[in-house]
């Protein structure tokens, strides 16, 4: 029994020792690793926990009456806790990151693209300047860390373009500053449009004697500084320095500072960074005379790497991203469905293979979302939104139908689940409602006409004019008798007011002025009874307002139109605006002018 107790003690003591080692290791890792949160709070928490574990461990080892099962369970829990904390700090625990948005702030764009490909999340890239975040690293994201992936379909990320060249800064009065101090200030504040000149002066050599502006200005605003070259007798021959890798501004500053004549050339370079000196025509140490035009210094400035566009259609998204970052190019991904290009493969690039570009050029790549399949839609507006978003061609046709309400869809040319090919045009047939034959109302009384129109579910309005027909008799109707229209179509009936009362002549009206007759605005040959059904068709849509207008005028030569541009968040330029197409069609006569709104953003 004693031997068995001693073995039990040994097991307990071993577990207590391991739990102690685990807690201490966790405490040390907490100190050594970088922290995202409050460093002191985390250290205090781990320190208090470590002190408690040390106290508990030694109290259990020295207490001979302790409950061995309790010690084993407590020790195992403490060991498990310590191991989990250590694994988390060393980023060995990945299960908690599954199905959640990660914190990409200050991470490389490549990591985000890899994550998006793995999880099927669309990434929208937005570029912004930042003085703090390295170029091509993430400034911010639209979804917080920990957001479940099931709740999102896309993620906006803001990518750093480096320092903002147009950021506003406060420029002090630098008069009397020496050149060293000025150069330091320009570099620290990233001013990028500074012009310097040197002139003979009795002021201290290499000090600012004139400044074009001070106070608030953008980094890109021009700032002119004039320095003193000292008195003329102070000019002397200068020993050239090595300008290689020096920033263009600093090199030119040196040359002007010593009154050295110079010339600038620019070439591509695979080794020298953009806007830095590649080479010089005179070696370092060469003595150059001031203002010597015949022996001017020629500096060649780097344009950066000469970037030749490869065949990006053979690259995947991650490879394209790495290539763009390596070459310091801007990158924009667009996504669209394509029945001939596999999912996540390149459909097109806005630059051809072999094209030469410079750094900072924007490269736009269109990536395939795979095949687009036909869906089901609640109404015509839902379909139009879906079709326009996915750049699907469609044509709208209209038919009378006794079972489907006016404006609702009768049928689609494609069934739900059918693959939409790039060349396909979806034809949708839209109901004009129940067909009604327009009655002949001319000669009927106003009341009889109203009863007849109501029985046919037709709407009406009236205009009045003097006529030899009896008063309140229909003398004209806007829609031709026996023409076919939809229910709820509006007819305009012209009602007789009876004969026009006789007006005495001017000679019998106590010398009143003669009455002037206003000419009718009615065009010659106009007949409102002659009507035509104007149907909005997708096939008549052009790429601009003028093109669509021309198509409709050709299709309906006897109808007068007024085409007006109207902004819309749905639809491409040249499409008939939804404000016009809501009824699908309308009855037009040959007298009135009809306004049609065209999408024009």
Image (cartoon, grey):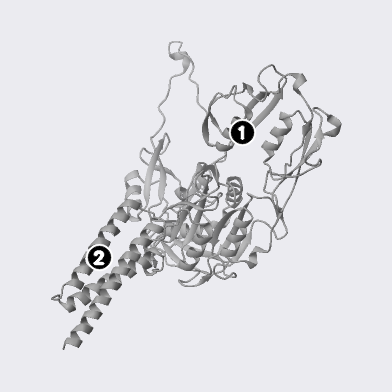
Q: Is residue 391 among the parts visible in the rendering?
A: no
Q: Nearer the viewer, residue 306 or 36?
A: 36
Q: Secondary structure at mark 2?
A: helix
Above-or-below relation of 398 to 420? above
Whole-angstrom CA distance, mark 2 to mark 1, is: 58 Å
Contact, CB < 8 Å: mark 2 with mark 1? no
What residue lies at 62% left-to-right and 60% top-to-bottom?
323
Left or right: where does residue 596 sit relative to residue 278?
left
Q: Residue at x 59, y 60 (%)?
A: 322
Whether 250 is drawn above or below 316: the answer is: above
The residue at which mark 2 appears reads as 54
* Image spot of residue 281 (x, y percent): 81, 41
Mark 2 or mark 1, earlier in chain: 2
The image shows residue 144 at horizontal and vertical percentages of: 38, 55
> Left or right: 550 with respect to 532?
right
11, 329: nearer the viewer: 11
Residue 177 visible, this angle: yes
State the image coordinates of residue 447 (x, y, percent, origin top left): 32, 45
Helix, strand or loop under label 1: helix
Q: Position of residue 1 (x, y in %)?
A: 16, 89
Q: Which residue is mark 1?
A: 183
Looking at the picture, tell me which residue is in the foreground, 349 or 474. 349
């Amino acid at each position: 029994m004693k031997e068995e107790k001693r073995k039990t003690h040994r097991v307990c003591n071993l577990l207590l020792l391991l739990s102690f080692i685990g807690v201490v290791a966790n405490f040390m890792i907490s100190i050594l690793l970088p922290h995202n949160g409050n460093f002191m709070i985390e250290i205090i928490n781990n320190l208090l926990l470590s002190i408690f574990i040390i106290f508990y461990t030694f109290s259990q080892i020295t207490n001979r009456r302790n409950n061995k099962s309790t010690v084993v369970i407590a020790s195992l829990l403490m060991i498990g806790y310590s191991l989990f904390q250590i694994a988390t700090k060393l980023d060995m625990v990945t299960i908690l990151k599954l199905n959640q948005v990660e914190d990409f702030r200050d991470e490389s764009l490549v990591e985000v693209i890899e994550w998006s490909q793995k999880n099927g999340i669309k990434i929208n890239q937005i570029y912004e300047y930042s003085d703090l975040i390295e170029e091509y690293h993430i400034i911010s994201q639209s979804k917080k860390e920990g957001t479940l992936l099931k709740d999102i379909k896309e993620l906006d990320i803001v990518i750093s373009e480096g320092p903002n060249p147009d950021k506003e800064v406060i420029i002090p009065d630098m008069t009397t500053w020496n050149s060293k101090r000025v150069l330091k200030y320009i570099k620290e504040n990233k001013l990028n449009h500074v012009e310097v000149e040197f002139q003979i002066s009795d002021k201290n050599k290499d000090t600012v004697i004139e400044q074009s502006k001070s106070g608030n200005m953008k980094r890109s605003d021009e700032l002119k500084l004039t320095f003193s070259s000292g008195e003329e007798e102070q000019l002397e021959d200068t020993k050239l320095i090595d300008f290689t890798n020096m920033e263009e501004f600093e090199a030119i500053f040196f040359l002007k500072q010593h009154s050295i004549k110079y010339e600038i050339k620019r070439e591509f370079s695979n080794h020298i960074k953009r806007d830095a000196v590649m080479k010089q025509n005179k070696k370092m140490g060469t003595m150059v005379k001031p203002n010597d035009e015949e022996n001017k210094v020629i500096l060649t400035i780097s344009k950066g790497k000469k970037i030749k566009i490869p065949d990006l259609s053979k690259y995947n998204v991650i490879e394209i991203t790495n290539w763009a970052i390596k070459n310091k190019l801007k990158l924009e991904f667009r996504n669209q469905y394509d029945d001939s290009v596999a999912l996540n493969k390149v459909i097109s690039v806005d630059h051809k293979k072999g094209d030469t570009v410079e750094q900072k050029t924007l490269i736009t790549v269109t990536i395939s979302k795979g095949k687009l399949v036909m869906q089901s839609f609640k109404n015509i507006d839902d379909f139009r939104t879906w079709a326009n978003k996915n750049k699907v061609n469609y044509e709208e046709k209209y038919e009378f139908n006794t079972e489907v309400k006016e404006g609702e869809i009768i049928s689609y040319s494609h069934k739900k689940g059918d693959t939409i090919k790039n060349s396909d045009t979806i034809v949708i047939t839209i109901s004009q409602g129940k067909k009604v034959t327009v009655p002949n109302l001319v000669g009927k009384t106003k009341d009889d006409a109203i009863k007849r129109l109501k029985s046919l579910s037709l709407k009406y309005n009236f205009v009045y004019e003097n006529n030899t027909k009896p008063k309140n008799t229909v003398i004209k109707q806007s829609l031709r008798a026996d023409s076919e229209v939809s229910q709820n179509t509006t007819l305009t009936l012209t009602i007789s007011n009876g004969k026009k009362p006789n007006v005495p002549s001017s000679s019998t009206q106590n010398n009143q002025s003669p009455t002037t007759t206003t000419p009718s605005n009615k065009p010659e040959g106009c007949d409102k009874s002659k009507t035509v059904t104007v149907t909005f068709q997708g096939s008549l849509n052009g790429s601009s307002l003028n093109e669509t207008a021309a198509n409709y005028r050709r299709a309906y030569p006897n109808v007068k139109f007024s085409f007006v541009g109207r902004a819309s968040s749905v639809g491409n330029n040249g499409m008939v605006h939804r404000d016009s197409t809501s009824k699908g069609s309308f009855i037009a006569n040959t007298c009135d002018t009809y306004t049609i709104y065209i999408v024009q953003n």
